[in-house]
Image: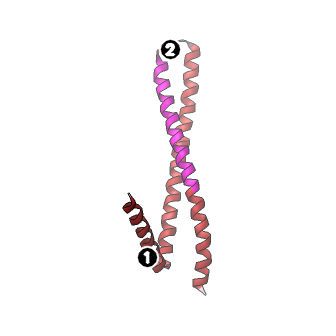
């Protein structure tokens, strides 16, 4: 009875894996965009040091606060991605331990496909 439960879970795990992969792609793009914005902001901040006046100082402080918030959000996002990656690795390990022959077959099939793709070039 337990193998049936595992097979039922495997279908759900497959959908979950696809969803997590799509989320990971979106997160990677967001992280990349955030890093670019932070880099551009730091460049702008360095360039603005030549400006003088109360208004420039106020704008600079406001911008530094926004930049710090962006850095904090990026760190949180990276930590979340790493945590989900660890969870996915644990889930994969459990699946492989529960279904060793399926894992071997899947690995062999992926190897054959990769070999075919490489040999086409």
Q: Earlier in the sequence, mark 2 or mark 1?
A: 2
Question: Please, is residue 50 above or below residue 9 in the view?
Answer: above
Q: Position of residue 7 (x, y in %)?
A: 59, 78
The residue at 40%/68% (across/down) is: 111
Question: Please, is residue 67 above or below residue 78 in the view?
Answer: above
| Residue that carries the numbered disc 2 in the rendered image | 51
**Label 2 Cα crowd, 10 Å radius (few <14 / some 14-19 / many 20+):** few
Q: Quadrant of residue 117?
A: bottom left
Q: Residue furthest front?
A: 120
Q: Residue furthest bottom?
A: 1
Disc 1, SS: helix
Magenta segment's dominant SS is helix
Q: Indicate the colouring scheme.
A: secondary structure
In the image, which is nearer the foreground, mark 2 or mark 1?
Answer: 1
The residue at 46%/80% (across/down) is: 101
Q: Nearer the viewer, residue 74 or 27?
A: 27
- Label annotation for residue 77: none
The residue at 38%/65% (across/down) is: 115
Residue 35 among magenta residues: yes
Q: Position of residue 1 (x, y in %)?
A: 61, 87
Q: Position of residue 68 (x, y in %)?
A: 53, 35
Disc 2, SS: loop
Residue 48 among magenta residues: yes
Q: Which residues are magenta?
A: 22-49
Q: Quadrant of residue 109?
A: bottom left
**Label 1 Cα crowd, 10 Å radius (few <14 / some 14-19 / many 20+):** few
Q: Nearer the viewer, residue 76 or 36?
A: 36
Check whether the beta carbons of the residues at disc 2 and disc 1 lie within 8 A of each other.
Answer: no
| Residue that carries the numbered disc 1 in the rendered image | 104
The residue at 56%/64% (across/down) is: 17
What is the spatial separation of the Cα atoms under label 2 and label 1, in whole angstroms?
64 Å
Give the quadrant of the C terminus: bottom left
């Amino acid at each position: 009875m337990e193998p049936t439960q595992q097979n039922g879970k495997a279908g759900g795990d497959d959908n979950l894996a696809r969803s997590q992969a799509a989320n990971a792609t979106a997160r990677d793009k967001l992280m990349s965009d955030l890093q670019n914005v932070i880099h551009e902001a730091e460049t702008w901040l360095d360039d603005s040091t030549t400006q003088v006046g109360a208004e420039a100082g106020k704008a600079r402080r406001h911008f530094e606060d926004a930049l710090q918030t962006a850095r904090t959000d990026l760190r949180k996002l990276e930590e979340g991605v790493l945590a989900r990656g660890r969870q996915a690795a644990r889930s994969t390990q459990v699946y492989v331990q529960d279904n060793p022959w399926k894992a071997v077959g899947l690995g062999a099939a992926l190897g054959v496909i990769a070999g075919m793709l490489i040999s086409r070039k």
